[in-house]
Image (cartoon, rainbow, N blue to C red):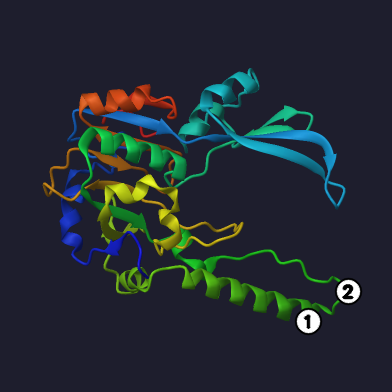
Amino acid sequence: MAGPLRVEHDVEVGRWLQAALHPLDSTVAGTMPPVFEAYARVLHPAMLSVATDRTDAHGGQVHETREITWREARSLIGDRLAAPQPWTSWLARFGEDQIDLGGGSWVGSPELGDIPLPTLTTLTELLLDEHGDAEVLVAVWEGSGLDPSTTSTFWPIDPSLASSERLRRHREAEAAHRELAWAAIDPAVRAAMEQQRLLGLPRERQGRGHVLLRGRLSAFADPAWVETAGLGWREGDWVDRGRTPNAVWPAEPRGAPAWMVATDLDLDVTFVGGSAHLVGRVLAHPSLEAERARPEDPLV
């Protein structure tokens, strides 16, 4: 599959990252190595769903949804905050994944585990302006959109059919869905997963194997890169999206990158490490909701 990324077969080029991370203390340093001058925590967008007076073909209430900042979420939620939960940055601040605003409207938490495409595009443009283009290494978790074997999808099937026929059609539909999902994954990526040529982050044997890829930073400036990346993205409105990077950093100098962008499969934020000037630009960017971070800060 010809795309902007190619599999890096020598996972040893990423071993420095394993050695630099601090996975046992639940701090930022467990995801972003403490080797940079400054750090920023970029908050992934939350979701606002507003009930309208319209109904759909089945009589259900129609909602209008849009992404919102955490700052806007806080102003909408007001004193409806639940007790903090220690699992994600959102839950640590808002207490619940979905917060009822009344009248059928609600605020929902950000998605976990991926750098949102608009966020990645904005960070790429900023990095290109700050440092120029470069060959980069990209770590992508092997699960979620790269593992269709465990996915299931709802398919509307005529309820008047016999249960055995409904089951047969459901199984056929799921098999077809998974076949299309596997076809959207680069064969070289599949081979790397099957042969376990993976980089465990933050450590090996923790269920967090990452396929290592190479490409140019500039490839991420156009969100359309996902269409040919072979990381599980397909046209249409699918429940199971493909993957975006869990970590991106310059390939050279090896083990001493000028910057890094990273998230984790359980996080709703992305960390940026680099120079104080770079991080200052991240914090000031109008399209990013970001706050300063330190390696010793709690992860969430």
Q: Earlier in the sequence, mark 2 or mark 1?
A: 2
- Residue 297 lies in quadrant: top left
Q: Which disc, if any, is residue 165? A: 1
- Compared to 67, does 171 lie above or below? below
**Which of 118 and 279 lies nearest the eye of the viewer?**
118
| Screen quadrant of the N terminus | bottom left
Report the residue at 85% width, 52% height from top. 57
Report the residue at 85% width, 70% height from top. 159
Q: Is residue 7 shown to the viewer in this render? A: yes
Q: Which residue is mark 2?
A: 160
Secondary structure under tag 2 reads loop
Mark 1, Cα crowd under 10 Å, few <14 / some 14-19 / many 20+, is some
Residue 74's x, y, as percent?
57, 22
- Residue 285 lies in quadrant: top left
Secondary structure under tag 1 reads helix
Residue 230's x, y, as percent?
41, 65
Q: Amino acid at mark 2?
A: Ser
Q: Amino acid at mark 1?
A: Glu
Report the residue at 59% width, 37% height from top. 97
Q: Which disc, if any, is residue 222? A: none
286 lies left or right of 241: left
280 lies left or right of 14: right
Q: What is the tally of numbered marks visible in this picture?
A: 2
- Residue 32 lies in quadrant: top left
Confirm or deny contact between disc 2 and disc 1 (CB under 8 A). Answer: no
Mark 2, Cα crowd under 10 Å, few <14 / some 14-19 / many 20+, is few
CA gap, disc 2 and disc 1: 10 Å
Residue 164's x, y, as percent?
78, 81
| Screen quadrant of the C terminus | top left
